[in-house]
Image (cartoon, rainbow, N blue to C red):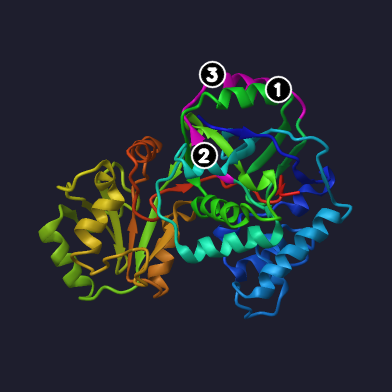
């Protein structure tokens, strides 16, 4: 059963929230972070992307980057623009994007639940990204950003959420991307802790590397003088499954080894293929749309003969029937010939990448469903990399979990 742990959040004074809150570290690169933080000294990007405060060209994994992140967080925590809650609390966090609301519980979850598979994963993590986030946690002595989890709807949790959101919020602001972010402090924290103690599993939606890094940081500090109770917990926003929406995670291929005409000819012998459809978005599961040479084509993915529910996912069937045998991309996690584009960017972004020469082929996918995520996770299996893209994204800097 799941552990929900109230915590003493470090949070911005209400009038400065919009200046502090930032996009998460992993949806932008260093150059984009530098541009977003320009002229914004309070932006939380200075904590989660501290290389932006060092000379251009600084390796984001250099020792001075981690030290800068820690000093930036310390300056933020000690400054007049933030304060720490006097008592441990739990919060409700609602996001509204394009008229659709997503409301969840913001608290800490237990490293032991992650290690013991109460918190279930669906994706492999990359050691380089694990190392990076683990070093930030250990150097900053904090979990600066929450992960996004989901759970099967629970009436007791829903009751507390509804009662809390009827009250005045702590924060309510619209970000530059038009997403509304609202946070309430829960008066009935004990009721939520009790409700989650009866929830059998939580599921990682977004933040696999941050979860793993929290586990590694706890292991590194266990049985040392630097250990504190808070090291064993990390912040998460837990949304009921009914609130979650997954967008497509599309693919681009830099080079077609045999050229576009031969690729289409080979594909037509293996796939049901309709040429020049002008359709850029798949209409059903098992369908993909391909953009090359200025035209959109539509193909149907063959079924798989492999065992396991994960093998039946569209992204797995794409790997099995196209990327591996036709394009020679055997491992999408490491092959530089393939890259991934979040569905929030739309198919026009795919067209631009091909037309600019950055790719020869774009593949528009049908979204993985939240039900598929839960089924794969329950079976103890893993999805292929980049199977899910969740929107809207949580903002960073709203509620920070310190070890002390």
Numbered disc in front, either 1 or 2? 2
Tell me where the magenta segment starts and ends, as one range. 147-168
In terms of sequence position, does the residue under pointer 1 or pointer 3 come before the other?
Answer: 3
Residue 166 is a magenta residue: yes
Mark 1 closeness class: few <14, some 14–19, many ≥20 residues within 10 Å:
some
Q: Quadrant of residue 318?
A: bottom left
Residue 274: x and y, percent?
Answer: 19, 54
Number of numbered labels in the structure image: 3
Viewer-nearest residue: 357 or 74: 74
Do residues under tags 2 and 3 come within 8 Å of each other at their CB atoms? Answer: no
Numbered disc in front, either 1 or 3? 1
Marks 1 and 3 sit apart, C-alpha to C-alpha, by 15 Å
Q: Quadrant of residue 246?
A: top left
Residue 64: x and y, percent?
Answer: 69, 74
Marks 1 and 2 sit apart, C-alpha to C-alpha, by 23 Å
Residue 381 seen from this side: yes
Q: Is residue 50 left or right of residue 300?
A: right
Viewer-nearest residue: 229 or 152: 229
* Residue at the disc numbered 1: 188
Q: Is residue 374 left or right of residue 89?
A: left
Mark 3 closeness class: few <14, some 14–19, many ≥20 residues within 10 Å:
few
The local secondary structure at tag 3 comes to helix
The local secondary structure at tag 2 comes to helix
Q: Quadrant of residue 185?
A: top right
In terms of sequence position, does the residue under pointer 2 or pointer 3 come before the other?
Answer: 2
In the displayed structure, 192 sits above or below 204; it is above
Circle on res. 155? 3
Circle on res. 113? 2
């Amino acid at each position: 059963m799941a552990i929900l742990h109230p915590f003493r959040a470090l949070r911005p004074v209400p009038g400065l929230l919009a200046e502090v809150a930032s996009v998460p570290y992993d949806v932008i690169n260093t150059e984009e972070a530098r541009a977003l933080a320009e002229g914004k000294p309070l932006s939380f990007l200075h904590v989660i992307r501290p290389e932006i405060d060092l000379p251009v060209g600084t390796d984001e994994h250099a020792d001075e980057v981690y030290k800068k992140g820690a000093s930036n967080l310390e300056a933020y925590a000690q400054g007049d623009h933030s304060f720490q809650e006097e008592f441990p609390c739990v919060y409700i966090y609602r996001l509204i994007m394009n008229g659709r609301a997503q409301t969840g519980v913001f608290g800490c979850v237990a490293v032991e639940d992650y290690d013991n598979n109460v918190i279930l994963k669906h994706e492999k993590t990359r050691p380089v990204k694990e190392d990076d986030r683990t070093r930030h946690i250990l150097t900053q002595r904090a979990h600066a950003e929450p992960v996004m989890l989901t759970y099967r709807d629970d009436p007791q949790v829903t009751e507390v959420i509804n009662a809390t959101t009827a009250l005045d919020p702590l924060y309510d602001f619209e970000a530059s991307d038009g997403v509304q972010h609202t946070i309430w402090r829960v008066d009935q924290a004990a009721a939520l802790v009790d409700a989650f103690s009866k929830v059998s599993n939580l599921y990682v939606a977004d933040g696999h590397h941050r979860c793993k890094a929290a586990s590694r940081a706890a292991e590194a500090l266990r049985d040392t003088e630097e250990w504190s109770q808070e090291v064993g917990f990390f912040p998460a926003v837990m949304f009921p499954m009914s609130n979650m929406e997954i967008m497509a995670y599309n693919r681009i291929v830099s080079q077609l080894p045999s050229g576009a005409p031969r690729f289409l000819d080979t594909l037509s012998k293996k796939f049901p293929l309709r040429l020049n459809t002008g359709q850029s978005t798949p209409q059903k599961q098992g369908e993909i749309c391909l953009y090359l040479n200025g035209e959109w084509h539509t193909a149907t993915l063959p079924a798989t003969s492999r065992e396991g529910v994960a093998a039946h996912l569209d992204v797995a069937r794409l790997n099995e029937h196209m990327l591996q045998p036709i394009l020679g991309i055997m491992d999408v996690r490491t092959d530089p010939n393939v890259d991934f584009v979040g569905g929030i960017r739309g198919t026009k972004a795919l067209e631009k990448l091909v037309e600019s020469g950055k790719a020869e082929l774009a593949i528009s996918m049908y979204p993985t469903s939240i039900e598929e995520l839960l089924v794969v996770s329950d079976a103890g299996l893993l999805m292929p990399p980049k199977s899910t893209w969740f929107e809207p994204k949580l903002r960073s800097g709203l509620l920070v979990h310190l070890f002390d």
